[in-house]
Image (spheres, rainbow, N blue to C red):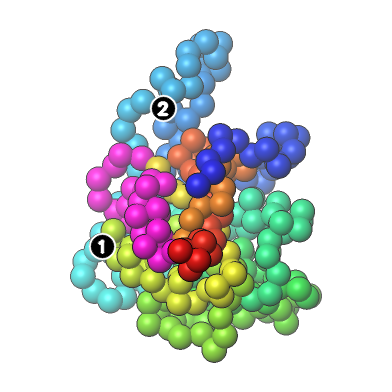
Amino acid sequence: MRVLSSFSWVPLSLASSTPKTAAPYMQLWIGATNLRMDEKRGGKEPLAKEREGSVRFKPEVHQMQQLVTTGTSGGWENCWEQGLTPWDLGRPTPIILHLHQTGALPKGRALVPGCGSGYDVVAMACSERYVVGLDVSHTAIEKAIELSSSLPNSSYFTFLKADFFTWHPPELFDLIFDYTFFCAIKPEMRSKWACKVQEMLKPDGELLTLIFPISDHVGGPPYKVSVSDYEEALHPMGFKAVTIVDNELAIEARKGREKFGRWRRDTTQSLI
């Protein structure tokens, strides 16, 4: 596995220029607690020092957790009905836009599990890439369809209400993109998640993951994650990380707690 410390392929001008329109979304999922050097102190203290301390969740996250963990099967649906969706950026994930615009996404068929409002599905869809957005919430799927039905690339994507763990696609995928889905499922489900990824992905397909939230908090969702958590789930399924890097295009509140990973099957295993 090759681990890099930064995005060598992300232009500095792009990585350092968060759009002003991102401001309303800066405090989603995890509050921006100790993520940057305090400018009032002149930036003299190390960034590592600024990241010390416990993670603080916004009130909406605690309300969402109560709905999801009540034991009812409609927890996620209730969240969408009540507008308690703190994971939803309300726009495409910046790094997905960048990868699409620079031609760095695999072509073919793509899957976004837990697609929510569908912004990433729409952002990836094009004549060379057909994208399926999957979500267990009927309300989320309705919202995604409403927001995207009139777009010019609407013939290159579709939204389906289905359970990722029981759904069987008619065709395998060249690409699966996972963000705020792995961290939303209970940790004991992670091996089943990896098994399902292997089942749905072509042998030469690619899995893209945004590893978030990297923290030490207890409980969830979102449940804490780490690179080793993904490796523990994916390695038995034959996946190895091609690249794992800090996501320098993460929204401000998530910087320092999010890594981007590209995973492929380890084809050398079949040769041993």
> Label 1, label 2: how many angstroms apart (C-alpha)?
28 Å
Q: Position of residue 271 (x, y in %)?
A: 50, 66
* Numbered range of the magenta stretch: 215-238
Residue 121 sits in quarter: bottom right
Dot 1 falls on a residue whose secondary structure is helix
Q: Amino acid at mark 2?
A: Arg
**Between residues 16 and 11, which one lies in front from this camera angle?**
11
Q: Amino acid at mark 1?
A: Glu
Residue at the outermost left position: 71
Which quadrant is the C terminus positioned in? bottom left
Mark 1 = which residue? 188
Dot 2 falls on a residue whose secondary structure is loop
Mark 2 = which residue? 51
Q: Position of residue 227 (x, y in %)?
A: 41, 47
Residue 11 inside the magenta-drawn segment: no
Give the residue displayed 55% in from the left and 67% down from the top: 176
Give the residue displayed 40% in from the left and 66% down from the top: 237
Q: Position of residue 261 (x, y in %)?
A: 53, 51
**Between residues 94 and 266, which one lies in front from this camera angle?**
266
Give the residue displayed 45% in from the left and 77% down from the top: 199
Residue 111 seen in the current view:
no
Residue 150 sits in quarter: bottom right
